[in-house]
Image: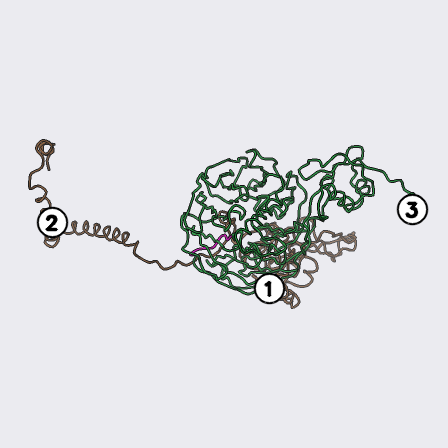
Chain colours: A brown, B green
Amino acid sequence: MPQGDYIELHRKRHGYRPDFFERKRKKDAREVHKRSAFAQKALGIKGKMFAKKRYAEKATMKKTLAMHSERTNRHKIDQVEEGAVPAYLLDREETSRAKVLSNTIKQKRKEKAGKWEVPLPKVRPIAQDEMFRVIRSGKRKTKQWKRMVTKATFVGAGFTRKPPKYERFIRPMGLRFTKAHVTHPELKCTFNLEMIGVKKNPNGPMYTSLGVITKGTVIEVNVSELGLVTPAGKVVWGKYAQVTNNPENDGCINAVLLV
Amino acid sequence: MASLIGSSSPVNNIISVLADPEGRPLGSQLDLPQNAGPRELQTLINTLLHNEESLPYAFYIKDEELIGHLGAHLLEKKVSVEQVLQIVYQPQAVFKIRPVSRCSATIAGHSEAVLAVAFSPDSSCLASGSGDTTVRFWDLNTQTPLFTCTGHKSWVLCISWSPDGRQLVSGSKDGVIQIWDPVGGKAIGNPLIGHKKWITALAWEPAHLQAPCRRFASSSKDGDIRIWDVVTRKCVICLSGHTLAVTSIKWGGEGLIYSSSQDCTIKVWETTQGKLVRELKGHGHWVNTLALSTEYVLRTGPYDHTGTKYTSDEEIKKAALKRYNDSKRDFPERLVSGSDDFTMFLWEPASSKHPKARMTGHQQLVNHVYFSPDGRWVASASFDKSVKLWNGHTGEFVATFRGHVGPVYQISWSADSRLLLSGSKDSTLKVWDIRNRKLREDLPGHADEVFAVDWSPDGEKVASGGRDRVLKLWMS
């Protein structure tokens, strides 16, 4: 390798050698054969290093060739993407939607039969001594006919207690709830919705009539916030949901919407 | 008996002056009797304006329509009689359109959501574009599919009929535009390539400026507007200036193109050389939609409710020009823009670059604004589930239509400007009565979001399409 510019200076002053270009051309032509001979004969670490370098060269060469031949290639039509939206919705990110609402007739039939496909089919049975606590009353505190509910309850907006003297079941105000955190199973988002009533408590019809809410209870919630519409065009404002936690331990009611 | 009644109650006179919708008084002050009603005022107006035939008018006192007697109206609305009463008169459409109430056909055919629906200007043909990359033509007499036009490689986002009804142009998500012939259902020529991103809107040159219709403009997400010539199938002019996506374009009757963009501006271009004439600034967020006061007339070209057919281009141009001048009278062209900043502006772009009025009231972004065919009202559909009605000349708020339970996507007017149709995400369509400002008809039936609605120019049918992949035709 020339360490200086004397070659360039000479070329500038006197021009190239007369046979320079021909010699260069021929030398370059021989390079190919020389390289190939070296590749075949080189052994040991030298050979390995050369092979690695050569492989990388070949890979990039293949890529550029493929790129150049793209123009002549005919592509198969790509699969059309799903989820077509009109132009005014294209730049907007909307949360993924649930599928179309289920038929109301089917739901009414299920209601009549009293059976639903619920996320929690079996729940732990709750004994009466766990559900109620005995309240002693009377002058000598010997009468034991009153009971206090120890689980969460729902009473409704227009609820008025019976006269305390005749009240057998006491539902303490601290355990009364009006709202539930309802999760939509497909959208996976949770809404804080008002309850309308208790539909069925799996532990028994007495608990249903009292309005006791335990794990597995089916409650009815007000879904007018969600803006759901039935195929007939009516606005849906009440839907069933099943409670998934123990409200008396957590202090809130978590439920999953039954769609 | 009659004389007894006449003499029992003294009839008071009210000093009033008749004014046109812009506020200019017609003649001098008049002394009108208290028991004058709309009919008497109508005969008065017709004689004052020297109309050959008695045309129907509606009368408004302080934006409240006069229905009964003048006296009763004033008592009810507690309007003072001490000042000169200004009665604004508005000409009404001679024909009356019945509201649609039933779904006459549900036509399946598309395999993906229907994204755009459009009736031809003479209401003879219906076209729809969908996410399955096809454009389909539908036969209105038998309510079945007519042609399926393949050719696009991506979702067909917008379609637009030429004002003479001879061509349909469609734009897709990969920026390609294709021209179709509705008679045979075949493509006219090769697809037009030029845009780099998806097409957001298409607008034809009005028929009264040039017939047969040759030029149309397209806007795209890449910020360009291109004017194409159908005959040479080339892009004639490229108007670049917007920095972000162009969301909507309209070709005005005076040969100006209005374009709205996500860079919060509206630009006005002239079409011979492609120069920027004006820039209208004012919005604080993306401008989603534009509406022109003459839009409906320009879209329908020479065709009107009488249903006459035209054969030669001269006739088309003349008829279109006549209709345009009739609807415009001497009011300048007005433009309303709706934006993501929950407000709309009323502009008069030919005269100034400052807005005439700011229309606030919506609580969510405004998705679609549309002028009524006679230019009196502007309706706006918003994601806050309401449709609002505004005065088309002054921009004052008139009424809100509530009823939808999901964002309202698109609206469409009936040809006589008395009924308004809205389609929403909650899968219902609703027909609103402008006179009573109430819900007229509720049209449920779609199984999923309604993306596109259109009312045919002859007022007989409504077509709607959405995510449930069927096209529904509604009739009265």
Which residue is label 3 attached to? B3
User: Looking at the picture, do discs 1 and 2 lie on one chain?
Assistant: no
Which residue is label 2 attached to? A29
Q: Which of B318 and A73 is in front in this view?
A: B318
State which mark lies toward you, 2 or 3: 3
Mark 2: amino acid: Ala
Name, please, the residue furthest toward the left: A18
- SS of the residue at dot 3? helix
The chain letter under disc 1 is: B
Residue at left offset 40%, top offset 55%: B190
Crowding around mark 1 (Cα neighbors within 10 Å: few <14, some 14 to 19, many 20+) is some
Mark 1: amino acid: Ala
Mark 3: amino acid: Ser
Residue B105 marker = 1
The chain letter under disc 3 is: B
Crowding around mark 2 (Cα neighbors within 10 Å: few <14, some 14 to 19, many 20+) is few
Where on the picture, by quarter, is residue B442?
Answer: bottom right
Residue A95 marker = none
- SS of the residue at dot 2? helix
Query: Can you give x and y, in whole percent of width and height, for residue B246 in the image?
Result: 48, 43
